Image (cartoon, grey):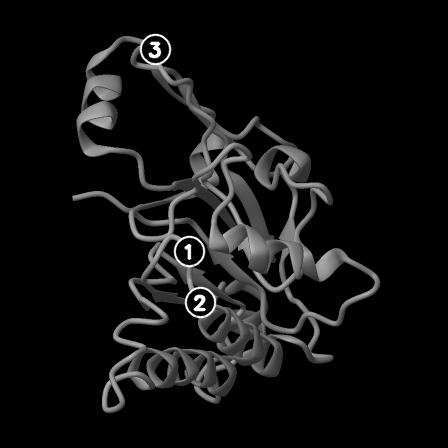
Amino acid sequence: MADLSREDISNTLRVLVATDCHLGYMEKDEVRRHDSFQAFEEICSIAVQKEVDCVLLGGDLFHENKPSRTTLVKAIEILRRHCLNDRPIQFQVVSDQTVNFPSTFGHVNYEDPHFNVGLPVFSIHGNHDDPAGVDNLSAVDILSACNLVNYFGKMVLGGSGVGQITLNPILIKKGSTAVALYGLGNIRDERLNRMFQTPHAVQWMRPESQEGCQVSDWFNILVLHQN
């Protein structure tokens, strides 16, 4: 940060990318049980040390679809320790947040007036921690309900046929930088392959042209978790 001018800092979106943390891996092994949590702690510590704007997780934050209470508590503790503080957020989410984050609250977590979020975390799910059950919930939904993680890229698919998905980007602006962040949580490989080969089954929504920001000005990022 010291090598960047004030103008560079105000226009540079600094993102720490991590994936496959697999929290809870070998949690019954007395030697290995702490490894995944120590690695995730290090990730969050580096994010704070480097003063990044946000952390971007590419799926499989948890090793199992139904992580143990111990694993959930440790994950919440790490996120709470590093993400809740008074550090000001330097970027804005300018897209329709009710579409980006279709949860009960429907907005990015740092805009909640009841929480001081100084390190926003954005995450999709992987094949280990994918949604399941009648209500189609995953362990990442628990972290989202706790306002510790911004869960995106979750698609609702019917039980039969190829299905259809629409990818709406999270539009992030920091100074002159404009980023369109697309997310696609894990879908069974065979099904997603068929969807990409079926006309109009996968639809990509592009940002609308705005004053001072054309479609070509957006830098596109796609986060996905597939084999």
Of the numbered discs in the image, which one, if any, rests on residue 200?
Answer: 3
Residue 59's quadrant in the figure?
A: bottom left
In the image: residue 17, left or right of residue 181: left
Foreground: disc 3 or disc 2: 2
Amino acid type indicated by mark 3: His
Residue that carries the numbered disc 1 in the rendered image: 66
Mark 1 Cα-neighbour bin, 10 Å: few <14, some 14–19, many ≥20:
some
What amino acid does circle 1 point to? Lys
Q: Amino acid at mark 2?
A: Ser
Q: Residue 176, can we see it?
A: no
Residue 125 position, x and y percent, is 39, 49
Which residue is label 2 attached to? 68
Secondary element at tag 1: loop
User: What kind of element bears circle 2?
Assistant: loop
Label 3 or label 1, whichever comes before in sequence order: 1
Q: Which mark is residue 195?
A: none
The residue located at (66%, 61%) in the rendering is 146
Q: Return the x and y of residue 105 as percentages of the image width and height.
A: 73, 45
For residue 2, above or below residue 179: below
Horizontally, residue 110 falls left or right of residue 142, namely right
Residue 180 position in % (x across, y down): 47, 42
Tags 3 and 1 in contact by the CB under 8 Å rule? no
- Residue 222 visible in the shown view: yes
Q: Residue at x 27, y 89 (%)?
A: 30
Residue 38 spot, x, y in % from top left: 36, 86
- Sequence order check, earlier mark of 3 and 2: 2
> Cα distance, mark 1 to mark 2?
7 Å
Q: Nearer the viewer, residue 1 or 21?
A: 21
Up-down relation of residue 190 to residue 86 (above or below): above
